[in-house]
C-alpha cells in the first residue's frame, strides 16, 4: 500500500478552467474516444486536414499503371502521406507493419471494371478491420445509380458495425454514367452519406458551388484526385478545394503516376496544411523533382 499523503496544502488551480473537451474535426465532438483517436490518425490535429494516398484501384481495375508493383511504387513514398487508402489484401501482403500513418481500408467491392460497377457488396467484416488496426473503412455509395439502395445499405451496415468497434466510416460518393459532377448532385450525395452516419465523406471537386457542398455536409469532406492531370493543375485544384472548405485530398493517380511522386506529395502537403499558393507549390514540386527524381511512382 502506498503511504498516506500527509501534505495538507494542495493546489487544484481552481482559477483555471478545465480544457475544452471538444474535438478538432467538424461534427466529431460526440464520438467515442477510440473513434476520435482513429480520426486523429487520418487528420493532422494541428491543421484538421489530411493528405491521403489512394491506391485501392486494383480491387476492380487490376494492375493499374503505376501500381504494377506496389512494393516498388508505393511503399517508398507511403510514410510521406497522412493516411493510406488501400485494400486489406495489399495491406497484409505489401505494407510493412512498422507503418505508422493512418489506414483507410476499402470495405466494398464485387464487380470488376468489366461489369456494372455500382453492384457492390460489403467485402470486409468490421472485426477484420479491427484486427488490422484500421483507422477507418471506406464504402462506395452510388447515389442515383441502379443499385443506389443496396450501396446505401452497405454504408449503414458498416456504420452500425463501426460504432461497435470505434472505427469511422468513409463514404465515397461514386459518380456513375450520366450523372454530372455539379454542386447540386455532389451536395445531395455528400449530405446523404453524412445523414446516414458516415464520419468522413470523399467526393469530387466541382468548378462552381463547391463551398456550398462542403457547408451542407456536417462532417469533413475530402476531395478525390480523379484521373491524372498535369501536376500544376492538380495542385491548383487541391488549393481551391481547401480554400472552399475541404478537409483534405485523397489522391492516387496524380501522385503515383507523377514523374516525381515524392515531390508531388511534399507539394500537396504544403498546399493542404500550410495554404501554400498553387504557383509556389508547383515551383516547390519542380525544385524537389530535381533532388528526389522518380522515387516510387509511374515511369
Image: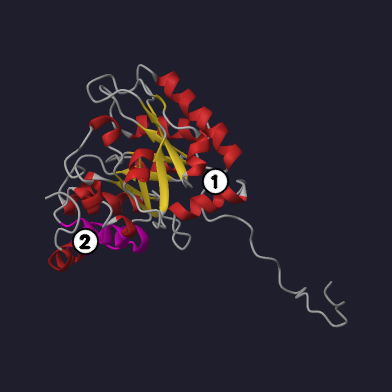
Q: Which residue is mark 1?
A: 27
> What residue sits 38% from the left and 18% below the top?
147
Q: How many marks?
A: 2
Label ID, residue 174: none
Q: Is residue 193 left or right of residue 113?
A: right
Q: Is residue 218 visible?
A: no
Of label 2 and label 1, which has the lower sequence position?
Answer: 1
Q: Nearer the viewer, residue 273 or 84?
A: 84
* Image: magenta residue range: 260-282
Residue 18 on the magenta segment? no
Image location of residue 222, percent across then percent down: 38, 45
Q: How far is mark 2 from mark 1, CA to CA?
A: 33 Å
> Residue 266: image x %, image y %?
27, 62
Q: Position of residue 25 (x, y in %)?
A: 51, 52
* 206 displayed left or right of 128: left
Q: Look at the numbered disc 2 and give the secondary structure of its residue.
A: helix
Residue 293: quadrant of the picture: bottom left
Q: Nearer the viewer, residue 121 or 211?
A: 121
- Residue at the spot 55% in from the left edge and 51% down from the top edge: 36
Left or right: 166 with respect to 15?
left
For disc 2, the marked residue is 263
The image shows residue 178, relative to residue 103, as above or below, that is: above
What is the quadrant of residue 100 in the picture? bottom left
> What secondary structure do most residues of the magenta stretch adopt?
helix
Q: Nearer the viewer, mark 2 or mark 1?
A: 2
Amino acid at each position: 500500500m502506498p503511504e498516506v499523503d500527509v501534505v495538507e496544502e494542495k493546489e487544484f488551480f481552481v482559477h483555471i478552467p478545465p480544457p475544452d473537451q471538444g474535438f478538432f474535426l467538424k461534427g466529431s465532438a460526440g464520438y467515442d474516444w477510440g473513434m476520435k483517436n482513429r480520426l486523429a490518425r487520418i487528420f493532422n490535429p494541428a491543421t484538421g486536414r489530411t493528405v491521403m494516398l489512394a491506391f485501392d484501384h486494383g480491387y476492380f481495375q487490376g494492375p493499374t499503371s503505376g501500381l504494377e508493383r506496389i512494393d516498388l511504387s508505393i511503399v517508398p513514398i507511403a510514410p510521406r502521406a497522412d493516411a493510406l487508402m488501400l485494400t486489406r489484401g495489399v495491406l497484409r501482403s505489401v505494407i510493412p507493419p512498422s507503418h505508422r500513418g493512418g489506414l483507410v481500408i476499402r470495405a466494398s467491392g464485387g464487380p470488376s471494371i468489366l461489369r456494372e460497377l455500382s453492384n457492390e457488396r460489403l467485402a470486409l467484416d468490421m472485426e477484420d478491420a479491427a484486427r488490422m488496426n484500421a483507422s477507418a473503412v471506406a464504402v462506395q455509395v452510388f447515389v442515383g445509380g441502379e443499385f443506389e439502395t443496396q450501396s446505401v445499405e452497405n454504408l449503414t451496415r458498416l456504420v452500425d458495425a463501426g460504432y461497435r468497434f470505434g472505427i469511422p466510416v468513409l463514404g465515397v460518393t461514386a459518380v456513375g454514367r450520366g450523372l454530372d459532377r455539379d454542386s447540386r448532385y455532389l451536395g445531395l450525395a455528400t449530405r446523404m452519406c453524412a445523414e446516414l452516419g458516415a464520419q468522413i465523406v470523399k467526393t469530387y471537386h466541382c468548378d462552381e458551388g463547391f463551398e456550398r457542398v462542403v457547408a451542407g455536409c456536417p462532417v469533413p469532406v475530402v476531395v478525390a484526385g480523379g484521373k491524372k492531370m498535369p501536376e500544376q493543375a492538380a495542385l491548383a485544384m487541391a488549393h481551391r478545394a481547401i480554400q472552399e472548405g475541404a478537409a483534405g485530398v485523397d489522391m492516387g493517380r496524380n501522385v503515383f503516376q507523377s514523374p516525381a511522386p515524392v515531390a508531388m506529395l511534399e507539394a500537396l502537403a504544403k498546399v493542404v496544411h500550410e495554404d501554400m499558393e498553387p504557383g509556389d507549390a508547383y515551383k516547390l514540386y519542380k525544385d524537389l523533382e530535381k533532388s528526389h527524381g522518380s522515387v516510387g511512382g509511374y515511369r
